[in-house]
């Protein structure tokens, strides 16, 4: 249960004054559903409003706030021309307040002749006279003038920065004073305000870097502490030591001798599984580095030791592919493999469930369906999560509740993650890295081409098809809309079919499973030469004969995604090429991304650069991580504070009595405040 002291902050936005249906929509678009969301929606910039009593040519170009009195109105020749209100300052100097849009009644109402108003807006010179076009604010003398520094917030249509600031002040009024969770010497060294004062300071003065740093630290600290508590709790629980005798692994007929990195990772995993405390390990490998083989070796250790293994994939396509490749590699071995996804129904599903319960199924491959309550294992010893960024800490914990004793857990990710993010996302895990490529994998040649040369690209595709080659053509996600994403792919597929006939296939996220599988199977078997796709093929499609990847509007994709897509080719013996089609107008970031893609195939380097290029809002966005976003910590602050926060969290756990001492009680509040309370719940349940 969340401590009562925090409840006012976690109230729905409707609890704030002045929230009606009109303003709820833009708030929802910004993801602001509760008072705390508004409190944590920090300004990204500010306007300095200089307060003056007299007009001065030296202030031209600045935003000023000044008392003015209207003396006459002037309509230009046509009714559509500007309407001017002539006004004077305290010394009688003139300024024109200019309104466009053909509605002079509005301006007359704002400025009754002879009455003083407080006006704020940008002062400009027009010929010999001064003017303010469409003043930002016009207030009566009794009303409070705007602050000298006005915060600017990330906005959505239908809400202004001023309105958001007013709501933030209401949300802040609900924020309680909380006891201090930061280690006293660190607090003194940094000169930080208490958390509530820091939050109020950033909303009042967005340039207060010290207050921003404090808030970012609090969030990172709560995250690191939660991960540490998860780890401590897991280490305390007694798992099942599993020691394989090697008989099944010796029977495997491998296509190549494992790389040094694969052997090292497999040995680390085998060592962990032999321990009493459950393994928590992250296996990081670049596209094509051979994670599946390491996972299979680990699953066989469990089976050799008389336990069952489960392999969890994020999508049905990937689950089926894992099932097929494991079945192929295990052909002839006395190992029973089954699949369970949302599509398995009726008798097939029932027989799989019985086989799991009586232990006759050794390895289960599936999607989230293998989490469900109806799925019971006789002895689940190892769970492998093929994560692709789509599983968070909470889902990893759910899996471990599927056995009397928590199973060993291996999380695989094919997106190399910068070390900073490995610590923040997987701080409770040991890490193995596959940083060598298996023999036979050739580097992929990457070229960046202007979309004005689309005709040449289609010609080249035709030549590639004639020589028996296969290709992917990926269409981008346009904004957040699946519809426009789909429309782009359908349109491209239609255009290519007009040219090349029915050798063109199309897959997208809205297709039903069997339909999607049929197209994939036709492509894999060579019936189709080109697969036009949305980003659903980003993970796990394996067709060695496909040696050409064309990515349309490549400048709209992030680096990690481009690298994932490129990794769909280069899986066979042939030389592979990736063509990145770019639009004419490129931002600096997009230009840097595409240049890096052309320059390197090294996913670990790409990941580090991606972190530098991306903006703070995108850092661990939900589209990428499936885990809670850092709302207050920008990548720069995350880099700066991560190590300090990890050390402070460790001090709290090891020296200051964990969550039980006075600082621990305060830290408990921080875990709830930043919604990292899985750590607290674990301690309670474990």
Image (spheres, rainbow, N blue to C red):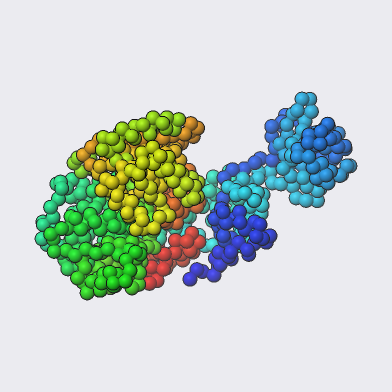
What residue is rendered at 30% in x and 62% in y?
Answer: 366
Quick one: quadrant of the C terminus?
bottom left
Residue 611: horizontal and vertical position, in percent?
41, 43
Residue 509 in the figure: left or right of residue 43:
left
Evaluate whether residue 33 shows in this view.
Answer: yes
Evaluate whether residue 86 shows in this view.
Answer: no
Residue 298 quadrant: bottom left
Q: Is 424 in front, or is 503?
A: 503
Residue 466: horizontal and vertical position, in percent?
28, 35
Residue 571: horizontal and vertical position, in percent?
25, 43
Q: Is 341 in front, or is 243?
A: 341
Asked if 126 appears above or below 89 in the picture, the reply is: above
Residue 24 in the figure: left or right of residue 653:
right
Q: Is 201 in front, or is 674?
A: 674
What residue is rendered at 38% in x and 68% in y?
Answer: 682
Asked if 88 appears above or below 240 in the picture, the reply is: above
Residue 190: horizontal and vertical position, in percent?
49, 48
What residue is rendered at 85% in x and 39% in y?
Answer: 70
Residue 572 quadrant: top left
Residue 552 in the figure: left or right of residue 348:
right
Q: Is 400 in front, or is 651?
A: 400
Q: Count the marks: how many?
A: 0
Asked if 402 appears above or below 639 in the picture, the reply is: below
């Amino acid at each position: 249960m969340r401590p009562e002291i925090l409840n006012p902050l976690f109230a729905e936005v409707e609890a704030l004054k002045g929230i009606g249906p009109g303003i709820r929509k833009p708030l929802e678009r910004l993801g602001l559903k509760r008072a705390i969301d508004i409190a944590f929606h920090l300004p990204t910039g500010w306007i300095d409003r200089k307060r003056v009593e007299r007009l001065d040519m030296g202030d031209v170009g600045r935003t000023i706030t000044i008392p003015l009195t209207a003396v006459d109105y002037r309509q230009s020749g046509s009714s559509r021309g500007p309407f001017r209100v002539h006004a004077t300052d305290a010394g009688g100097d003139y300024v024109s307040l200019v309104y466009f849009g053909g509605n002079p009644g509005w301006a007359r109402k704002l400025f009754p002749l002879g009455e003083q108003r407080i006006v704020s807006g940008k002062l400009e010179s027009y010929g010999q006279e001064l003017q303010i076009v469409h003043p930002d604010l016009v207030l009566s003398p009794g009303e409070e003038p705007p602050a000298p520094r006005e915060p600017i917030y990330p906005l959505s249509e239908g809400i202004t920065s001023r309105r958001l600031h007013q709501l933030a002040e209401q949300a802040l009024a609900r924020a309680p004073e909380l006891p201090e969770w930061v280690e006293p010497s660190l607090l003194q060294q940094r000169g930080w305000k208490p958390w509530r004062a820091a939050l109020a300071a950033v909303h009042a003065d967005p340039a207060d870097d010290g207050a921003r740093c404090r808030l970012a630290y609090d969030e990172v600290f709560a995250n690191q502490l939660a991960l540490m508590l998860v780890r401590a709790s897991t280490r305390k629980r007694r798992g099942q030591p599993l020691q394989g005798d090697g008989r099944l692994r010796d029977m495997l007929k491998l296509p190549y001798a494992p790389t040094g990195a694969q052997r090292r990772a497999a040995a680390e995993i085998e060592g962990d599984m032999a321990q009493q405390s459950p393994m928590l390990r992250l296996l990081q490998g670049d596209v094509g580095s051979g994670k599946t083989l390491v996972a299979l070796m680990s699953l066989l250790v469990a089976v050799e030791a008389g336990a069952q293994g489960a392999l969890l994939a994020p999508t049905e396509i990937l689950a089926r592919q894992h099932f097929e490749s494991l079945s192929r590699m295990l052909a002839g071995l006395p190992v029973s493999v089954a699949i369970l996804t949302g599509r398995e129904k009726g008798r097939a599903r029932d027989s799989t469930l019985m086989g799991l319960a009586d232990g006759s199924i050794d390895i289960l491959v599936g999607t989230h369906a293998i989490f469900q309550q109806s799925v019971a294992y006789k002895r689940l010893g190892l769970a492998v999560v093929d994560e692709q960024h789509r599983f968070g800490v909470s889902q990893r914990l759910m899996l471990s509740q599927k056995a009397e004793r928590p199973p060993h857990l291996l999380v695989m990710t094919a997106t190399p993650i910068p070390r900073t993010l490995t610590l923040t996302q997987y701080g409770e895990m040991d890490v193995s890295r596959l940083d060598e490529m298996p023999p036979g994998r050739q580097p992929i040649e990457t070229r960046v081409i202007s979309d004005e040369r689309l005709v040449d690209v289609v010609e080249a595709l035709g030549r590639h098809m004639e020589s028996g080659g296969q290709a992917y053509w990926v269409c981008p996600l346009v904004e957040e809309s699946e519809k426009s994403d789909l429309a782009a792919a359908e349109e491209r597929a239609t255009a290519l079919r007009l040219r090349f006939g029915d050798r063109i296939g199309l897959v997208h996220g809205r297709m039903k499973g069997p339909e999607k599988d049929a197209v994939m199977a036709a492509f894999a078997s060579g019936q189709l030469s080109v697969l036009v796709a949305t980003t659903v093929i980003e993970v796990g499609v394996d067709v060695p004969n496909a040696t050409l990847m064309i990515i349309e509007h490549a400048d709209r994709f992030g680096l990690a995604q481009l690298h994932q897509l490129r990794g769909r080719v280069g899986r066979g013996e042939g030389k592979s090429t990736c063509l990145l089609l770019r639009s004419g107008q490129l931002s600096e970031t997009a230009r840097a991304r595409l240049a890096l893609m052309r320059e390197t195939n090294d996913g670990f380097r790409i990941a580090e650069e991606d972190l530098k290029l991306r903006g703070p809002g995108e850092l661990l966005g939900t589209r990428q991580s499936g885990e809670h976003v850092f709302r207050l910590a920008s990548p720069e602050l995350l880099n700066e504070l991560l190590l300090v926060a990890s050390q402070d969290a460790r001090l709290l756990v090891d020296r200051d009595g964990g969550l039980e001492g006075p600082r621990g009680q305060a830290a408990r509040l921080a875990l709830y405040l930043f919604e990292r309370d899985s750590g607290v719940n674990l301690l309670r349940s474990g």
